[in-house]
Amino acid sequence: MQLIRSALVTFLSAGLALAAGCKGQEPMVYVLASEQAVTLTPSVSATEVKQGEQIVLRVQRRSVGQWKQIPRNQLTPGQCWLYTLPPEMEQEVADNVEWQVVPEEAIRFEGTFRMDHTRVGTVVRTGTIVITPRSSVRCEKDRVIEGPELRIEVS
C-alpha cells in the first residue's frame, strides 16, 4: 500500500511540475502567409442518364499555401487561424462544396448526410445539364473558386 501511495505522489508531482513548466507559454496557431492555390477535381457517376435517375457527384480539393506558426496572443482581431495545418489533399468534399446547376433545379439533391461525403441527386429534367463545383477558400475571406464543369445528357 505504501508503494502505491509513493508512486501516486511521484506521478502527481511530475504532473504538477510539467504543468508549472508550461504555465505562461502561449498556445501556437497557424496563420496563412500567402494566397493559396486551390483546385477542385469533380467527377460524376454517369454522363448519360434518363430523367428520374440518380447521379453521384464527387470532388477532390487540393489546397497549397504557406502557413506560419505564431503564438496565439500575436493574432490581430478577426485574423483567421488554425490549431493544426490543414490537409493539402482532401479526397472527398462533394458534400462540402456548392453545386451550381444550369438549368436551375434540374437536379434535386438529397439532404441526407453520407459517410463517404459524396453528393447524390436525382435528375428531374431532360436535355443537357451543366454542373460546376464552387468552394470557399479556407482563411481567405470572400474568395470562392470554381472547378471544371461537368456535363450530363438526360433523355
Image (cartoon, grey):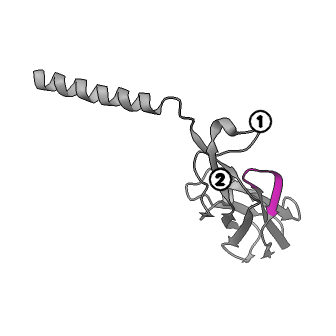
Query: Is 65 colored magenta in this rendering?
Result: no
Dominant secondary structure of the residues highlighted in magenta in the image = strand
Q: Element at badge 2?
A: strand
Q: Element at badge 1?
A: loop
The amino acid marked with disc number 2 is Lys
Residue 127 — which label? none
Where residue 87 appears, x then y in whole percent? 59, 59
Q: Nearer the viewer, residue 65 or 153?
A: 65
Residue denoted by label 2:
68
Q: Are there few (<14), some (14-19), or many (20+) residues within 10 Å of tag 2?
A: few
Please name the residue shown 69% across and 72% down the image.
43
Compared to 121, does 46 lie above or below?
below
Query: Is 139 colored magenta in this rendering?
Result: yes
Q: Answer whether residue 1 is visible to the viewer in this image.
A: no
Please name the residue shown 70% across and 70% down the image.
42
Where residue 120 appears, x then y in whole percent? 67, 61
Q: Are there few (<14), some (14-19), or many (20+) residues within 10 Å of tag 1?
A: few
Say which quadrant the C terminus sits in: bottom right
In space, the residues marked 2 and 1 are separated at their CA atoms by 17 Å
Query: Could you tell me how many numbered marks the image carries?
Result: 2
Q: Please, which residue is most extreme toward the right here?
A: 103
Marks 2 and 1, the one that precedes in the sequence: 2
The amino acid marked with disc number 1 is Pro
Residue denoted by label 1:
77
Q: Please provide the residue range marked out in magenta.
A: 137-145
Where residue 104 appears, x then y in whole percent? 88, 60
Q: Nearer the viewer, residue 71 or 62?
A: 71
Compared to 72, does 23 lie above or below?
above
- From the viewer's perspective, tell me whether residue 149 is left or right of residue 54: right
Please name the residue shown 71% across and 61% down the image.
121
